[in-house]
Amino acid sequence: MEAIALLIPIALVLIALVIAVFLWAVRSGQYEDMEGPAHQILMDDDERQE
C-alpha cells in the first residue's frame, strides 16, 4: 500500500510533464511540416541550392 501512495504522485507528475512537453512542441511549430523532410531526403543537393 505504501508503494501505491508513492507511485501515484510520481505517475501524475510524469503525465503532466509529458503533456507540457507535447504542448510546447505543438506551439513552437514542431509539427507544421510533416512531409517536407521526407521529400527533402529524396532531392539531390544541386536541386536544393537553386
Image: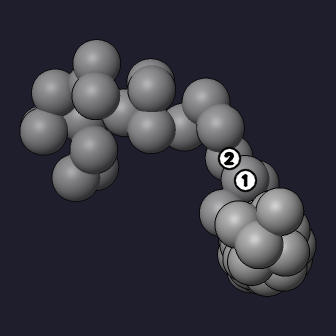
> Mark 1 — residue?
31
Query: Residue 42: x and y, percent?
Result: 28, 18
Query: Which of 3/38 is in front?
Result: 3
Any mark on residue 33, and which?
A: 2
Residue 35, how many percent across, how many down?
61, 30
> Could you tell me residue 4's position as x and y percent?
81, 63
**Which residue type carries mark 1?**
Tyr
The quadrant holding residue 39 is: top left
Graded by Cα atoms within 10 Å as few (under 14), some (14 to 19) or many (20 or more), the crowding at tag 2 reads: few
Q: Inspect this view and state whether residue 9 appears.
A: yes
Quadrant location of the N terminus in the rendered image: bottom right
Specify the quadrant of the image occupied by residue 36: top right
Residue 10, image x and y in percent? 73, 76
Dot 1 surroundings within 10 Å: few (below 14), some, or many (20 or more)? few
**Looking at the image, residue 6 lies above or below residue 11:** below
Q: Nearer the viewer, residue 5 or 8?
A: 5
- Between marks 1 and 2, how big is the CA–CA gap? 6 Å
Amino acid type shown at disc 2: Asp
Do the residues bearing badges 1 and 2 touch, measured as CB atoms within 8 Å? no
SS for tag 2?
loop
Total numbered badges shown on the rendered structure: 2
Element at badge 1? loop
Work out which residue is located at the far front of the displayed protein and give it: 1
| Up/down of 41 relative to 16, above or below | above
